[in-house]
């Protein structure tokens, strides 16, 4: 049995050899159906690209390190899927580590990866110490996925467009007829972007005075407490936009406890389209961050850097979409 | 600055050097408070055990591969935490891979790990092809965590005690006064063990005729559909024990949709104590598998094998506990 060639992949996928190459380089110029067909053929045949193997010197481990902010929070799972699909198709393995644990040791969070001589690093979510990252970026390509904090020069950033996402939410609620809308805000660059965009959209619709913003710690408990506070106001909002799904689930509980029915008495929107939002018991209107696409693009950035692309880091934003489910409706007319 | 020694760790933790050694070897003979104090001191000082480093020849990568059944299902997160804590304290890194992806390529799921020459392998959850595992187990130590399928000789198994867990659930419901109790069953060895133990416990309480068992695919949708079916029966159950939390969440939705209030009209119990069960909006009575402990014991098995322990594989079961939350109550008296 000879190993499968790029020609076999092209035949099986019903496309040209050059299209297979485009897909394996992670090009954005390929239609999703074609891309899926090629990646499926790669998987089914067990194809390993020679080019990728050649371009990686013997010194290399063909391994990419993925530093996760906190393994306990599963929002990154779709992103890993996207990362993995493209890295795998290029003969690269993915190695994960939990930045939370490394931080607790007080050590360089990327240290273990450097010891193992990974070829590149993907940092998923909130950034560890930027100075440490700079030292890593001097040795291997680094991509930050799903965070918007400033990064050292030469580091690429891929994330969802938080401003666009928050705008989609505000426009959805305004379109349903809501005027008094509250935002359970978060922290960090992502929290800031979502809040500012919510406020700007409300302003553009002449609703600046109807916007209520309350800070939160982005947890379920925080969403719960903030919503209890919001619903105890005399001029209570008819809709709540939470900075993430988990805070929105806290808001659901608060509404339930205060005897309000969602969405009849109160509309609630989350952010991230996590598996929790998709539960029938929750069925939350939320923003889908196209995390799979973010992961795929992060892999693409790394592959380009492996092939020698230099220069300053770029910021790429993936366009989010609104997932309208059962937690939003027009407000009750008095 | 000299690197920290075992003496520094012992001083900081307020224990003896030999106790530190015991903890680092993952001994079960140490009280949890002492163990936590030692592991904290290890982290805070950034201590790296020389012994571990010495025992690992230059050939070794000081890396343990962890093969996850499916990255999208987050039930393994606590287990990884437990694994990581002990491996990290022994100067070992953890490398994760998604068995689902490897299976789709039709390749040996552990292949990438062998290529990277990991020192050992932990298989988390449902087993890949047993034959493939046997080949791996001939080369490096292998531990299966959280699954109960038969394994090749020489492979250790660490899992929660499913029979004990299902018994705890049945006894809790019977103790509340329920007689007509349904079980939404699962598949595989774990599903089988939970079902059989539920049936045995019902039998012991003279309730064999009151036990209803319905199969499911262990998904939310499956739990929902099965519960709709169960609640449409003339002799409908007053309590439902689902094989896992996610199926129990489906049962919650079915009850809600049919106008039944949980726990007043129907008690529902899950299994696994996932983060979903802990949501205030769900607040599910469930079985805690002590996954952190399962992970820690799996790491312990590997460490023993690294130190040369041979012999047949052993099966170790960790004792689960019942987490009583808001989804169970006595049945309504007619």
Image (cartoon, coloured by chain):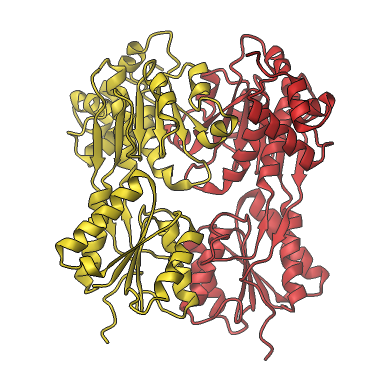
Chain colours: A yellow, B red
User: In this orientation, does residue B155 appear?
Assistant: no
Residue B209 pos. (x, y %):
73, 76
Q: Residue at x 21, y 65 (%)?
A: A208
Q: Is residue A235 left or right of residue B106?
A: left
Q: Residue at x 58, y 34 (%)?
A: A104
Q: Is residue A322 above or below residue A148?
A: below
B240 and B128: which one is in front? B240
Q: Is residue B37 above or below residue A302?
A: below
Residue B117 lies in what quarter of the image? top right
Q: Is residue A148 above or below residue B224?
A: above
Q: Residue at x 34, y 44 (%)?
A: A189
Quadrant, the N terminus of chain A:
top left
Q: Is residue B257 above or below residue B147?
A: below
Quadrant, the C terminus of chain A:
bottom left
User: In this orientation, does residue B280 appear?
Assistant: yes
Residue A310 pos. (x, y %):
25, 17
- Count of numbered tags: 0
Q: Is residue B294 left or right of residue A52?
A: right
B95 and A329: which one is in front? A329
Q: Is residue B229 left or right of residue A45?
A: right
Residue B81 pos. (x, y %):
61, 39
Residue B169 lies in what quarter of the image? bottom right
Q: Is residue B314 left or right of residue A303?
A: right
């Amino acid at each position: 049995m000879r190993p499968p060639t790029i020609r076999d992949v092209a035949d099986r996928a019903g496309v040209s050899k050059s299209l297979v190459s485009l897909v394996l380089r992670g090009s954005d110029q390929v239609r999703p159906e074609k891309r899926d067909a090629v990646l499926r053929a790669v998987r089914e045949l067990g194809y390993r690209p020679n080019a990728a193997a050649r371009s990686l010197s013997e010194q290399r481990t063909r391994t990419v390190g993925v530093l996760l902010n906190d393994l306990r929070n599963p929002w990154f799972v779709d992103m890993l899927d996207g990362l993995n699909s493209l890295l795998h198709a290029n003969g690269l393995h993915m190695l994960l580590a939990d930045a939370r644990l490394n931080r607790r040791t007080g050590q360089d969070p990327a240290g273990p990866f450097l010891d193992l001589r990974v070829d590149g690093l993907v940092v998923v979510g909130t950034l560890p110490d930027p100075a440490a990252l700079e030292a890593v970026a001097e040795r291997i390509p680094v991509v930050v996925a799903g965070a918007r904090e400033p990064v050292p020069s030469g580091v690429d950033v891929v994330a969802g467009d938080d401003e666009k996402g928050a705008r989609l939410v505000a426009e959805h609620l305004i379109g349903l007829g809501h005027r008094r809308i509250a935002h359970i805000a978060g922290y960090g660059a992502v929290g800031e972007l979502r809040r500012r965009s919510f406020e700007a959209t409300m302003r553009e619709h002449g609703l600046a005075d109807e916007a209520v913003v309350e800070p939160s710690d982005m947890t379920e408990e925080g969403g719960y407490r903030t919503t209890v506070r919001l619903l105890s106001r005399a001029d209570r909002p008819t809709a709540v936009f939470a900075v993430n799904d988990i805070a929105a689930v806290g808001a659901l509980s608060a509404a339930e406890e205060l005897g309000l029915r969602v969405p009849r008495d109160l509309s609630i929107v989350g952010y991230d389209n996590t598996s929790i939002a998709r539960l029938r018991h929750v069925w939350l209107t939320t923003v889908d961050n196209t995390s799979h696409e973010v992961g795929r693009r992060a892999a693409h950035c790394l592959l380009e850097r492996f092939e020698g692309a230099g220069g300053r880091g770029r910021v790429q934003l993936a366009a989010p979409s609104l997932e309208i489910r059962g937690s939003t409706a027009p407000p009750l007319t008095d």
